[in-house]
Amino acid sequence: MAHVTEVIGVYSELAAELALMANGYVVSRTRTAEAFDLKAVDPVNGEEYKFQVKTIRKRADRNGELVVYATNGRGNTYSKSDVDYFIGVLAEEGEVPRVFMFENREIREYWSSEARASKRWVELSIALNRDIYVTKDTEAV
């Protein structure tokens, strides 16, 4: 049986992929070990970006603030050449996950209260918006 931290990590990656797709991004995964977890094409500007997915933790010792530990397996920060954006997934017991996206500033930790997170970070809905995929020539299925 998989260890709980592995399950949570995979769950976070799937939630991030789902949120990107629900918001019109074209998402791909690498088959090789890379610094990023996902690549996705932005539906607005057509640019491709590299995303590193992290699970958001609530810190009881910091009044429930949200924290994303943004280091790799060796404890190093991600360079901007390795990762363009982080996607933090807040997966609380029995709740629908909340997915936040923010730029890589090459720091070890990103902190925010829940109230400030919706202002400082971009929250991506996991609800599918079919209108994003409909053009004048096609109809929604």
Image: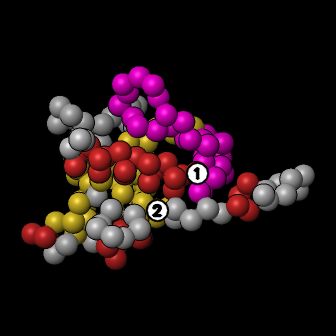
**Amino acid of disc 2:** Val
Which residue lies most toward the front here?
1
Task: Give the Cα distance between marks 1 and 2.
Answer: 15 Å
Q: Is residue 41 above or below residue 124?
A: above
Instruction: Examine the residues drawn in magenta and state their main secondary structure.
Output: loop
Q: Earlier in the sequence, mark 1 or mark 2?
A: 1
Question: Foreground: 111 or 125?
Answer: 125
Residue 137 lies left or right of residue 48; in this view the side is right
**Magenta region, residue range:** 22-47
Quarter placement of the N terminus: top left
Residue to which mark 2 is pinned: 122
Q: Could one spot residue 42 in this view of the protein?
A: yes
Numbered tag placed on residue 21 in the rendering: 1
Could you tell me residue 135's position as x and y percent?
83, 54
The secondary structure type at the circle numbered 1 is helix
Using a 10 Å C-alpha cutoff, classify the residue at mark 2 as few (fewer than 14 neighbours), some (14 to 19) or many (20 or more).
some
- Classify residue 96 by image quadrant: bottom left
Q: Could one spot residue 107 in this view of the protein?
A: no
Residue 52 lies left or right of residue 63; in this view the side is right
**Amino acid of disc 1:** Met
Residue 43 lies left or right of residue 134; in this view the side is left
The residue that appears at 29% across and 51% down in the rendered structure is 8
Could you tell me residue 19's position as x and y percent?
51, 56
The residue that appears at 54% across and 36% down in the rendered structure is 28
Mark 1 vs mark 2, foreground winner is 1
The secondary structure type at the circle numbered 2 is strand
Question: Foreground: 75 or 26?
Answer: 26
